[in-house]
Amino acid sequence: MGLFTPAEARAELTRLRPVLDEIVTVRADMVELSAALTPGGPPTDLGGLPERKAAEARLNELMTTVQETGAELKGVAPLLVDFPAELDGVPVLLCWLEGDPDLAWYHRADLGFAGRRRLSGGTGPE
């Protein structure tokens, strides 16, 4: 799969929103089910081990759906999705973090999340 332009990455992010929202829900269910399954854990009305296994399988399916787009799922808690791109001839990752209203950040591919910078005008580096 190739590189994304900022516009393509934003369109893909919009398309993936229902998948990302479901990941957040399933992730929370898994945590609650796991806690309930520990000895002396708090009860839950979500179910037991079968439901925990089903939630884990569903989470794996959803993560695969994200990765099949060419995006990179870098984190699940919080969700972090990177879209490979090139800005001004430099390999970068257009970066969306759970809670971000839009795809508005990027970082050089070699620097990682700590090097995040805001996209200017939605097209390239400032």
Image (cartoon, grey):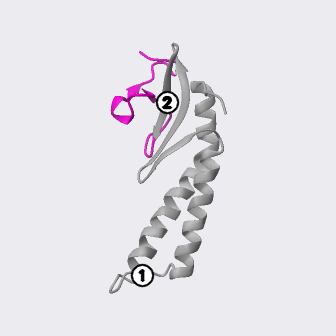
Main SS category, magenta section: loop
State which quarter of the image contains the N terminus: top right
**Residue identifier under label 1:** 37
- The span picked out in magenta is 97-126
**Residue identifier under label 2:** 93
Neighbourhood count class around disc 2 (C-alpha, 10 Å): few under 14, some 14–19, many 20 upward: many
Disc 1 marks a residue whose amino acid type is Leu
Magenta includes 111? yes
Q: Residue at x 53, y 57 (%)?
A: 23
Q: Earlier in the sequence, mark 2 or mark 1?
A: 1
Q: Position of residue 28 (x, y in %)?
A: 45, 65
Disc 2 marks a residue whose amino acid type is Leu
Q: Residue at x 35, y 82 (%)?
A: 41
Magenta includes 80? no
Q: Identify which residue, 25 or 71, lies in the foreground.
A: 71
State which quarter of the image contains the C terminus: top left
Q: Cα distance, mark 2 to mark 1?
A: 38 Å
Which residue appears farthest toward the front when viewing the image? 110
Indicate whether 39 appears above or below 74.
below
On residue 53, the disc is none
Contact flag, marks 2 and 1 (Cβ < 8 Å): no
Q: Position of residue 90 (x, y in %)?
A: 49, 17
Indicate whether 25 appears above or below 69.
below
Q: Position of residue 79 (x, y in %)?
A: 46, 49
Secondary structure type for disc 1: helix
What is the quadrant of residue 60 in the picture? Answer: bottom right
What is the quadrant of residue 43 in the picture? Answer: bottom left
Q: Residue at x 44, y 46 (%)?
A: 98
Total numbered labels: 2
Q: Position of residue 26 (x, y in %)?
A: 52, 64
Secondary structure type for disc 2: strand
